[in-house]
């Protein structure tokens, strides 16, 4: 099992910045992918950004140039720096941890942290 604890969600005005953090603990596998997804009520959860343990990143087009994902492997922590926030960025943000390959693939989720961007 892997536990994910997120922090950093808040309410901010449009144009502002927030930094989300997610610390993983438990049965961590060194080769993994950690990332952030977000979900609005009634909508599907969507990928915001992810980063492999080797540092390769994937960033959604909707946040490219505004959001940056990074990680500290020594602390099993992933960060999401969010700049130039827009009201449409409002959502619950979930930290995600993926490791292994089929049939031993494992996926874990954090509890979510609310980000609200007011206009």
Image (tube, rainbow, N blue to C red):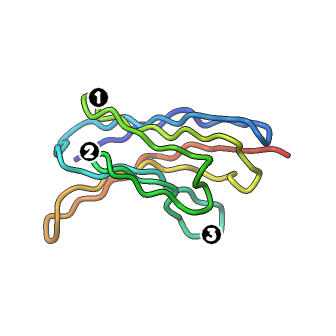
Q: Earlier in the sequence, mark 1 or mark 3?
A: 3
Say which quarter of the image contains residue 8.
top right
Q: Label for residue 34?
A: none
The earlier-in-sequence mark between 2 and 1 is: 2
Alpha carbons under labels 2 and 1: distance apart: 14 Å
For residue 75, which numbered disc appears in the image?
1
**Mark 1 surroundings within 10 Å by alpha-carbon count, few (fewer than 14), some (14 through 19), many (20 or more):** few
Residue 41 shown left or right of residue 110 in the figure: right
Observer-nearest residue: 56 or 95? 56
Kindly report which numbered mark, 1 or 3, lies closer to the viewer in this rendering: 1
Name the image quarter holding residue 103.
bottom left
Q: Residues within 10 Å of mark 3 (few under 14, many from 20)?
A: few
In the image, residue 46 lies at what x, y percent? 53, 64
Residue 47 image offset from top left, x and y in percent = 49, 61
* Residue 44 horizontal/vertical position (percent): 56, 70
Which residue: 47% across, 46% down? 111
Element class at badge 1: helix
Left or right of 64: which side holds 10? right
Q: Secondary structure at mark 3?
A: loop
Number of marks in the image?
Answer: 3
Q: Marks 1 and 3: CB-CB under 8 Å?
A: no
Quick check: 1 above or below 44? above
Residue at image coords 79%, 42%: 14
Of the numbered discs 3 and 2, the one sitting upstream in the chain is: 2
Q: Which mark is residue 2?
A: 2
Q: CA distance from mark 3 to mark 2?
A: 26 Å
Q: Secondary structure at mark 2?
A: strand
Q: Which residue is mark 3?
A: 43
Q: What residue appears at the point 73 percent right and 36 percent down from the top-left corner?
A: 16
């Amino acid at each position: 099992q892997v536990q994910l604890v997120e922090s950093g969600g808040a309410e901010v005005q449009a144009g502002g910045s927030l930094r989300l953090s997610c610390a993983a603990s438990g049965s961590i596998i060194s080769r993994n992918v950690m990332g952030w997804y977000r979900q609005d009520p009634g909508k599907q959860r969507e990928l915001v950004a992810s980063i492999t343990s080797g540092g390769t990143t994937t960033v959604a087009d909707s946040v490219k140039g505004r959001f940056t994902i990074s990680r500290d492997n020594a602390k099993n922590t992933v960060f999401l720096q969010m700049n130039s926030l827009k009201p449409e960025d409002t959502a619950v943000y979930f930290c995600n941890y993926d490791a292994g390959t089929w049939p031993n693939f494992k996926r874990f989720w954090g509890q979510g942290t609310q980000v609200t961007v007011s206009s």
